[in-house]
């Protein structure tokens, strides 16, 4: 991991990350741990999440608290948030990272599938915010960072439920920022481009796709999860204390 900024305001801050067991989420968890934050996260992948906890502990970092949770079950999410709160203290940073960009042709989408994709990619973001904002209000402020996607901005096809949900994250961010701003709770959205997680490499990266990536991005390199995690650190820290109601794109200049 290359050297990056240290944010003193993040030390000992309690952070809750959804989908923290792998990919971008695992990088987010690691980066907050390296800031000295107290981190709790949920994920559906128990094996990957436990491996992450062990790896961070082996590297001399404080172990994050992992709770297995299927975010489609809102009551289970509320319970998980309560477990992290009991273990670490009031939550003052929320990172709504969890999502799933499964491809799906229009003709194969059923009403049940539509509802499932909205639940996986959007619904839990609102209910996580609803569950943690009282902690932030009592603490005198906090930060919520939602994860969007450039997929809807560039008109990507082949997954209409996903792109619909991700476009709605921008609206949710603005709604929450307006409602929670009087409590000194900042709400921003970090919007990743095509980030080279292992899943993306295994499932979607082709020579043709890589060529298009290098053509469309201003930066002629592949983006990695750390590129997203570092942006999230800024929006979680007091250094961005005047920033709310924003969507910040991290895509190498594609959009």
Image (tube, rainbow, N blue to C red):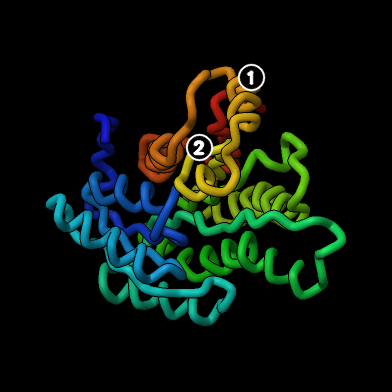
Q: Nearer the viewer, residue 65 or 37?
A: 65
User: Going by the image, does 79 lie left or right of 74?
Assistant: left
Comparing 138 with 94, the one in front is: 94
SS label for mark 2:
loop
Residue 19, image x and y in percent?
46, 60
Q: Which mark is residue 243?
A: 2
Residue corresponding to mark 1: 215
Crowding near the residue tagged with mark 1, few <14, some 14–19, many ≥20 C-alpha atoms within 10 Å: few
Q: Nearer the viewer, residue 204 or 137?
A: 204
Question: Can residue 241 be seen at all in this image of the molecule?
Answer: no
- Residue 227 lies, with reference to residue 56, above or below; the image says above
- Where the N terminus falls, by quadrant? top left
Q: Residue furthest right?
A: 107
What residue do we see at 64% from left, 61% from top? 122
Report x, y in % for residue 185.
48, 52
Real-space Cα separation, disc 1 to disc 2, in angstroms: 32 Å
Quadrant assignment for the C terminus:
top right
Q: Are marks 1 and 2 in contact (CB under 8 Å)?
A: no
Tell me residue 16's x, y (percent). Answer: 39, 61
| SS assignment at label 1 | helix
């Amino acid at each position: 991991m290359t050297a990056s900024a240290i944010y003193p305001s993040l030390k000992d801050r309690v952070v809750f990350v959804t989908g923290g067991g792998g990919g971008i989420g695992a990088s987010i968890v690691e980066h907050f741990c390296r800031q000295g934050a107290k981190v709790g996260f949920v994920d559906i992948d128990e094996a990957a999440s436990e491996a992450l906890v062990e790896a961070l502990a082996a590297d001399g970092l404080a172990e994050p608290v992992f709770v297995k949770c299927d975010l489609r079950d809102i009551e289970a999410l509320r319970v998980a948030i309560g477990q992290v709160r009991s273990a670490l203290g009031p939550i003052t940073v929320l990172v709504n990272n969890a999502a799933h960009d499964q491809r799906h042709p229009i003709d194969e989408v059923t009403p049940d599938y539509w509802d499932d994709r909205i639940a996986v990619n959007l619904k839990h973001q609102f209910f996580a915010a609803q569950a943690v904002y009282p902690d932030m209000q009592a603490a005198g402020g906090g930060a919520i960072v939602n994860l969007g996607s450039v997929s809807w901005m560039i008109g990507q096809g082949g997954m209409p439920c996903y792109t619909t949900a991700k476009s709605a994250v921008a609206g949710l961010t603005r709604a929450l920022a307006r409602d929670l701003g009087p409590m000194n709770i900042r709400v921003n959205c970090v919007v990743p481009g095509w980030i080279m997680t292992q899943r993306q490499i295994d499932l979607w990266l082709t020579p043709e796709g890589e060529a298009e990536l290098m053509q469309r991005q201003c930066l002629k390199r592949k983006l990695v999860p750390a590129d997203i995690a570092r942006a999230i650190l800024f929006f979680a820290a007091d250094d961005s204390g005047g920033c709310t109601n924003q969507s910040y794109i991290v895509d190498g200049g594609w959009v």
